[in-house]
Image: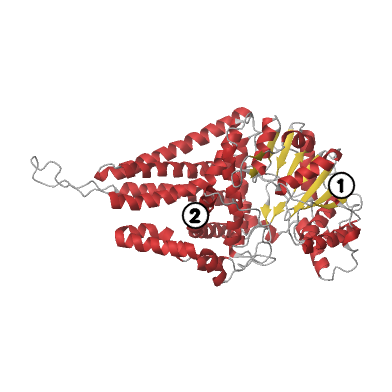
Amino acid sequence: MSPRQTSLPRTWAARGLALALSIGLGASAGALFLQYGSGDGLQAMDWLRSGLILLSTFWLAWGACQGLLGLLAWRAPPAPADPAPADPALADPALADPLAEAPAIRGRTAILVPVYNEQPAPVLARVAAMDASLAALGLTDRFDFAILSDTRDEEIAAAERRWFLRLVTERGGEGRMFYRRRAVNTGKKAGNIEDFIERSGAAYDFALILDADSLMEGSTIAEMVRRMEADPKLGLLQSLPRIIEAESRFGRAMQFSASFYSPVFARGLAALQGRTGPFWGHNALVRLEAFAQSCGLPVLAGEPPFGGHIMSHDYVEAALLARAGWTVRVDVDLEGSFEEGPENIIDYAKRDRRWCQGNLQHTRLLMAPGLKPWSRFVFVQGILAYIAPLFWLGFIAASIAAIVLAPVPDYFPTPYDQLFPIFPHNDTAKAVELAIGIFGLLLLPKLLIAAHAGWTGRARGFGGGWTALRSTLVELLFSSLIAPVMLMYQTRSVAQVLLGLDSGWPTNNRGDGTLGIAEAWANSRWIALTGLAGLLFVWWLTPALVAWLLPVGLPMLFSPQLIAWSSQRGGAARGGAPRLFTVPSDLAPSPVILAWKHVLASWTAAPEGGAAPPAEVTEPQTAYA
C-alpha cells in the first residue's frame, strides 16, 4: 500500500552526493571563470564575478541533482483503480468498492476547505464532487467537510451561505458538512486552520488540508488515510498536486511542467528529504494530535514583512513536526490530487510576491531551537529560491562594471627587456565552455525526463513520444523567454521586502486571465524601459557586449507583448488529436474532475433559487461537529 521508505543511510547518501556534486560543479564554474578573467590580469571584479558564478551554478546544479535523483528512483505508477462511473456527479454508494481489499478506515477525517473572497459556486462544487467520490467508496461516514471562510466581502459571504445550503441539500450533508465564517481573519490561512483545530480538532483523528481550488479523488483521500493509519509515526503526508483546467499559453505551459517534470523532481526531493519532508500547505493529510501538539506558530516580534504572523507557514509546520519526532513525507505515487494555477504572468508574479516575503521571513527562524539540520537547510533553500536570481543580475551588472573599471592594456610590461608586444591571452573558448555548461544544467534534466518518458511509455499520457518531446522543447524555449521577466519581478519583490514593504494577502484571481496589451504594459512597462535603457547603455559603453545581453534584454524590452500573448488561450487536446502541452487530464480526465464539471454546470445553468436565506445557516459558534 505505502511506497517503500528510504532508509536513513540512503537518505544521507543521497544528500551527500547531491551536495558534493553541486558544490563541485559550482567551484569548477567559478575556477573556469577565473581562468577566463586572468587573460588581462585578475582584478577585484573578476573575483566578484567568479563568486557569483559559483553561487549561481551551485543553485542550478542542486536543482539538476533533484531531477537526476528522481530519474534514478523512478518506479512506474500503478494502474488507475478508480474507474469513472456513468454519471460521476451522482455516484452510487452501492457501487463495488475498487479498494475493497484495502484495510478498513478506522479514524475520522475532517476535510478542511479554507476560502478567502472566492467565488463560492466552483469551490463548493468541488466539495460536492469529492463527497460523491467518497460516497462511491461507501466512506462518507468516515469523512466530514468544513468550509472555513475568511471572506471579507459581505456579498461574497452571503453567496457562500446560499451555495453551502444548496450543497448540503443536494448531498444530504447535514451533520457532516459544516460552514463557519471568522469575524476576524487573524493569521490568515494558518490562523484559519488553527481556529478549527482549537474548536473542533478533538473530534477527528486526521485533517485533509485543501486550498479553495483543490480537488482530490475519493480513492486518493482514502489511501492517504490508510497510509497514515498504517504508520503511527507519520505526522504529515503530502501528495503532489497536478495543475488542471489551464487554458492560456502560460497556464498550459505550467500545467505541462507540473504533470511532466514535477513528479520526477518531487521523487528526487523525496529521496533527499526522507522523513523530514515537505509541506506545501494544501492537498496534504495531517495527524491532528501531532499537528495540535507541535505546530503552534509564534507571532514574530516587529512589523511585517519580517515580523508579525508567519506567512509561509507550511515550511515551518513541517519543521516543527520533524522537531517533535514525527515523520513528514511526500508520496509521489499518489495520483488523483489536483489544483489550479495562474493563467498569466502578472497573477503568477503577484502570488510569487507573497511567497517571496514568506520565504525571506524564514531568516528569522534559521536558528530556532531544536530544529533538524535538514529543516534549517530547507529554509535556506527557500530563501535561495528568491536570492539566487539576484546572483545572475549581479553578475550582469559586475560584467558591465568590469569593462568600465578595466585597466588600459599594457602590451609592453617590461619595455627595456623585450622588442615585441605581449598580447593578452584569448580565453574566449573558456567563456563559451562555461556558458554551455550552465545552460546544460538548465536543459539536460528536462531533456532526460523527455527521453525517459519516451523509453518507459509514460509519454503516451502526454500525446505520445513526439508530442511530449515537442512540448518539452517549446516549454524550454518559452521558459527561457520569460525567465528575464520573472527575474525582474523577483528582484523587485526582494527589494520591496528588504525595504520593509508588506505584500499583504491578495485574493487569487481565478478563471479567465486574458490580458490586453494595455494592461500588460501598465504592469510591465518598468521592465521594458529597464531593458531598453540597459541595452542602450551597453551599446554606448561597448557594442561587442550587446550580443551577449540580447537573450536577457530582448525579453525585457518586449515583456508587455510577451505577457499579453502568453495570457491568450493556447488550445487544448480535449477529445481530439493531441496538441502542444497535452497532459493526461486532457486525454482521460479523472472521474472527480468530470463530477466537478457536471455539478458546476448544473448549478450555474439555473438560478440559486430554492436556497434558504443566509440567516438559516448554522452560526459560526456551532458550525463544527
Say which quarter of the image contains residue 233: top right
Q: Which one is in front, 87 or 135?
A: 135
In this rendered view, identify the residue nearer to me: 190 or 212: 190
Q: Which residue is identified by label 1?
A: 624
Q: Residue 487 got which mark?
A: 2
| Left or right of 262 in this view: 592 | right
345 vs 219: above or below: below
Q: Residue at x 56, y 44 (%)?
A: 360
Q: Residues within 10 Å of mark 2 (few under 14, many from 20)?
A: many
Residue at 46% x, 62% y is 556
In the displayed structure, does residue 78 sit left or right of residue 364? Answer: right
The amino acid at mark 2 is: Leu
Residue at (78, 46) in percent of width and height: 221
User: What amino acid is at disc 1?
Assistant: Tyr
Q: How many marks?
A: 2
Task: Find the residue positioned furthest to the front.
Answer: 302
Q: Say whether residue 86 is visible.
A: no
Disc nearest the viewer among 1 and 2: 1
In the rendered image, residue 66, in percent from the top left (x then y), is placed at 55, 42
